[in-house]
Image (tube, rainbow, N blue to C red):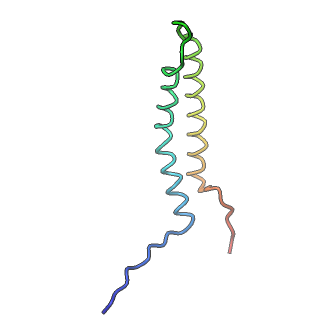
Amino acid sequence: MNERPKRVFLERQNYRRRRLIDFIRMVPVFGAILWAVPLLWSTEEGRQVATSDAIVFIFFVWFALVGVGCVLARALRDGNDGSARTQD
């Protein structure tokens, strides 16, 4: 008897939900990378970057991460995966 391996089929909705969860898990990594950007700002002729500019940038990133988190959590809760649902 030759048994073929069964195909793994994942419904589109479940697949997109899993990819959304994967993206949600990556948001803190993106946030950490963005928070490190002020450390990479170049200085001209020994001048330092103003602390106020760095703090404003960090809070902007923080507010953006909160907003993205809210949108993604709502999309996950509502099951909105970006595709139009058709009712049969």
Q: Is residue 66 left or right of residue 8?
A: right
Up the image or down, 58 lies above or below 84; here it is above
Single out the residue that lies furthest toward the bottom.
1
Residue 67 in the image: state x and y as whole percent. Answer: 61, 36
The part of the image, by quadrant, that contains residue 88 is bottom right
Q: Residue at x 59, y 18 (%)?
A: 56
Residue 66 in the image: state x and y as whole percent. Answer: 57, 34
Single out the residue that lies furthest toward the top.
46
Residue 74 in the image: state x and y as whole percent. Answer: 59, 47
Up the image or down, 39 lies above or below 86; here it is above
Q: Residue at x 61, y 43 (%)?
A: 71
Q: Residue at x 57, y 28 (%)?
A: 61
Q: Give the mark count.
A: 0
Q: Residue at x 59, y 29 (%)?
A: 63
Residue 15 in the image: state x and y as whole percent. Answer: 52, 62
Q: Nearer the viewer, residue 10 or 44?
A: 44
Q: Nearer the viewer, residue 83 or 80?
A: 83
Single out the residue that lies furthest toward the front.
45
Q: Quadrant of the N terminus?
A: bottom left
Up the image or down, 79 lies above or below 35; here it is below
